[in-house]
Amino acid sequence: MSALFTGKNLVHFDRVSSTNNVLSDMLSNSKPLEEGSVIMADEQSNGKGQQGAFWESEPHKNITLSLLYRPDFLTIEDQFYLSIAISLGISDFLEEALQQKSHIKWPNDIYFAHYKIAGILIENTLMGSHLKTSIIGIGLNVNQVEFKSDAPNPCSMKSIAKKDFDIPSLLPSLFQHLEWNYMLLKAKRFDYLKEKYLSKLFRYQQECDYRIGGTVQKAKIIGLESSGRLKLMINNEVKSFDTKEIEFIL
């Protein structure tokens, strides 16, 4: 079974600055882009990561793409559920391809054990109190085995499976899993998606070290607020944090 609309319009480039930038520029043109359109590149000169970080990707070795969805059914307050759905789509795809359990490191990095295999960057535009468009940047390490940046603990599908993968043949399954979880989101299956997300959440219900306010503290992840803020138990007190307020110590 293939995706109904995700990836049906796929534009491939050899090299771009950033697939998110290219897709954003296309959206600015007068001709509307259909939902599910994908911009993919073999090489990015300025790939985007979370909080302005650079996403390292060796040319021709990985999946670097940006996907357009139009989640106008989501309010601004519920926008984190889009991040949940996309994270689950990538996690489900990888578990099927590699036959191993993956984890989602909050908010939306995909891990195997303590090693990062994929990252997501979502850039939304708004109309009133709802989302209008979402550009979803996905970086997925496939055949790269040497990493030069100081990003913590990278891994790839090849380093896990000990074999090369044909990137084009991976795309139909990836698009299918992304679309399936997106359609669950569209059906407002928020409780189901959140429960599944928590079941995959990295370090969920485990007491670990985090850097909070410049100091290292022991804390336990106990859940999420509807806004996506991370809820932790610290010294028998529940506190919540956004991505800039807490750092995982790996």
Image (cartoon, grey):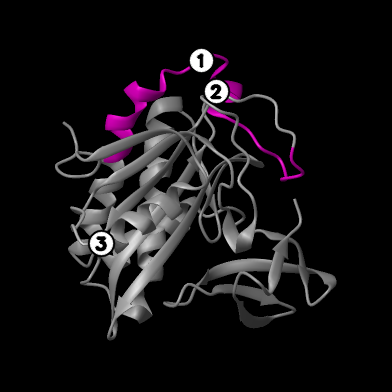
Q: Are marks 1 and 2 in contact (CB under 8 Å)?
A: yes
Is residue 125 placed above or below 136 in the rendered structure? below
**Label 2's element?**
loop
Residue 99 position within the rendered picture, expressed as x and y whole percent measured from the top left: 44, 27
**Residue 27 sits in quarter:** bottom left
Circle 3 sits on which residue?
A: 185
Residue 162 position within the rendered picture, expressed as x and y whole percent measured from the top left: 57, 15
Q: Quick one: which residue is furthest to the front in this view?
A: 30
Q: Sort mark 1 into few (<14), some (14-19) or many (20+) by Cα contacts within 10 Å.
A: few
Q: Is residue 146 left or right of residue 133?
A: right
- The answer to whether any part of residue 205 appears in the image is no
Amino acid marked by disc 2: Asn
Residue at image position (43%, 43%) is 91
Q: CA distance from mark 1 to mark 2?
A: 6 Å
In this picture, which residue range is highlighted in magenta?
Answer: 149-175
- Sequence-wise first label, 2 or 3: 2
Q: CA distance from mark 1 to mark 3?
A: 33 Å
Amino acid marked by disc 1: Asp
**Tally of numbered tags:** 3
Observer-nearest residue: 45 or 236?
45
Q: Quick one: which residue is furthest to the top in this view?
A: 163
Residue 174 colored in magenta in the image: yes
Observer-nearest residue: 77 or 44?
44
**Residue 14 sits in quarter:** top left
Residue 173 position within the rendered picture, expressed as x and y whole percent measured from the top left: 29, 32
Circle 1 sits on which residue?
A: 164
- Sequence-wise first label, 1 or 3: 1
Observer-nearest residue: 82 or 57?
57
Residue 73 position within the rendered picture, expressed as x and y whole percent measured from the top left: 21, 72
Q: Is residue 232 left or right of residue 63?
A: right
Circle 2 sits on which residue?
A: 143
